[in-house]
Image (cartoon, rainbow, N blue to C red):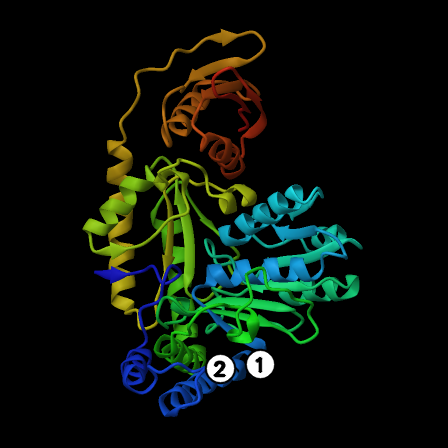
Amino acid sequence: MAYFDAASTEPLHPAAKAAFLSTLDEGWGDPARGYHDGRRARMLLDAARETVASVLGTRPDEVSFTTSGTQAVQLGMLGVLAGRRRVGAHLVLGAVEHSSVLHTADTHAARSEQRGTTAEITRTGVDRTGRLDVSAFASALRSDTALACVQSANHEVGTVQPIAEVAAACRAAGVPLLVDAAQSVGRLPVPDGWSVLTASAHKWGGPAGVGLLVVRKGTRYVSALPYDEREARRVPGFENVPAIVAAAVALGAASTESAEEDARLSGLVDRIRARVRETIPDVEVVGDPIERLPHIVTFSCLFVDGEVLLAELDRAGFAVSSGSSCTSSTLTPSHVLEAMGVLSQGNIRVSLPRGTAEAEVDRFLALLPGLVARLRAGVAQPPAAPVAAAAEEGVVVDALGRRCPIPVIELAKRILDVEEGTAVVVLSDDEASALDIPAWCEMTGHEFVRAEPRERGSAYVVRRRS
C-alpha cells in the first residue's frame, strides 16, 4: 500500500517511536511532584518544551501541550475571546479555515447570545487558488474585534496563506492574531507577528494525542475551562510525558531534515500537477501552484463519483483522501472548495509523507488515467431526462433525485445540442450542484447566469458560449 495521506496524519517518525518507548520507562512519574520520579518526568517535560520553543522561535513558558490540535484551537480562541471581552465580541476568520475554527466561532456566538450580547462573525473570502484576500481581511478588522484567525496553509488544497501581511494588518488594528499552523509546523517556518499559534504533533510525525498551544507574552488570555494549575493554567489534566517527548523529538528531527526532503517532495508534486492535466481530460488541479505546501496536491475529475474513485484507488494500493461532497456521508460540499469556487466532483487530495518513493508516484500516475476513464464509462446514466423548450428558460434538464456527478454530466451533454446564446436549465436537488455547476462553467467557458430556489431543489441557468 502506498500511503498518500500525510495531510491527515504523517507516519510516526522513527526517532519519535524510540523516544516514546524510552520515556515510558523514564518519564512515567507525575511531573508536578517533588520526589525523584516526578522530578525526572518534569525534566523530560521541560526539555521537550524547550525543544519545541527553539523550533518555533518562542519562549518555553509560552508553550503549552494540549491533547490535540483541535483542542489547542478551541482553547486558544475561547481564551483570547474571554480575555478581550471588554473590547468586544467581533471575530474575523478566513472562509477556508479548518472546521475546528468554524465550530468554535459558532460556540462563541451561541455563548454570547446566552449572555444577552451579539457576537458578529465576519468570514472574508479567498480567490480561486484558496489564497486569502488580505485587503478584505484588513478592512474587516474593527475597534470591537476581539480576535482574528487565519490558517498558515490550507488543509485541503495546500495553499500557503500570506501570514506576514495579515499579521501586519492585525498589528496596525491592535487585534491579536491566532494562526492555525497544523499543516505547516515542521515543514515551513511560520512568519512572526502572531499572538497565538496552534499545531498538532501527528501532522509532523509525532504521536497522535499531542497538540500545541502557544500564547505570546502580552496577549490577554483567560482560560475557558475551570482552574487547573498545569500547563500555565491553560490546559487541564495530567500531561502525557512520553507522547510529548516523542512529539518534541519528531519536531526537532523534521525541522532538521525538512529542507532537502521537502524540496524532493515538492518536485514530485509538480510532476503530479503536470501529468494529471496532460493525461486526464476534464480535470482541474486546484490550489496555488507556487505558494503551497511542498507535499500536497489536489485535483478534481469531472464526471466521476468521488467515493467510487477513492475506493478503486484503495483497491489498487493507494491511500488518498478527498474534500469532495461526493465522498461525504452528509453529501455537503467542502466549505473550502465552495469558497474557492472550484469543482468538487471526483476530488482527490494526494499528500506525500516523508520518504515517499519516486517509483510509487510514477505507478500512481500510470494507473490513474485508465482508472478515471473506466469509471467515467461506467457511471450509471439516468433515463433520458425530459427536454422542454420553455420560452423564457430555454432547454430544461430534469436531474431531480440524481446525485453528483449526474447533474453535471447531463448538463455537459445537453449544452452541446443547443446554439450559442441558448440557456440550459438544470433542475437539481443535489447540494453539490450549487458548487459544481458554476465551477464547471468557469472551467469550460460557458456562462453561469443564476441559481433559483424551487419548491424542490434549485434551477441552475447556464448559457452556452462557444
Q: Secondary structure at mark 1?
A: helix
Which residue type carries mark 2?
Arg
In which quadrant of the rendered view does residue 272 lie?
A: bottom left
**In terms of depth relative to the viewer, which is nearer, 223 or 160?**
223
Residues 417 and 77: in front is 77
Task: Count neighbours of disc 2 (C-alpha within 10 A) and say few if under 14, some if 14 to 19, many if 20 or more.
Answer: many
Most foreground residue, 228 or 8 = 228
Is residue 47 visible in the rendered image? The answer is yes
Q: Secondary structure at mark 2?
A: helix
Q: Quadrant of the N terminus?
A: bottom left
Q: Residue at x 33, y 15 (%)?
A: 384
Q: Amino acid at mark 1?
A: Asp
Side of 344 where 315 appears, left or right: left
As measured in the structure, the alpha-carbon distance from the residue carrying label 1 to the one carrying label 2 is 8 Å
Percent x, y of residue 170: 72, 62
Residue 180 in percent (x, y) is at 54, 62
The mark that comes first in sequence, 1 or 2, is: 2
Q: Which residue is mark 2?
A: 49
Q: Which residue is mark 1?
A: 61
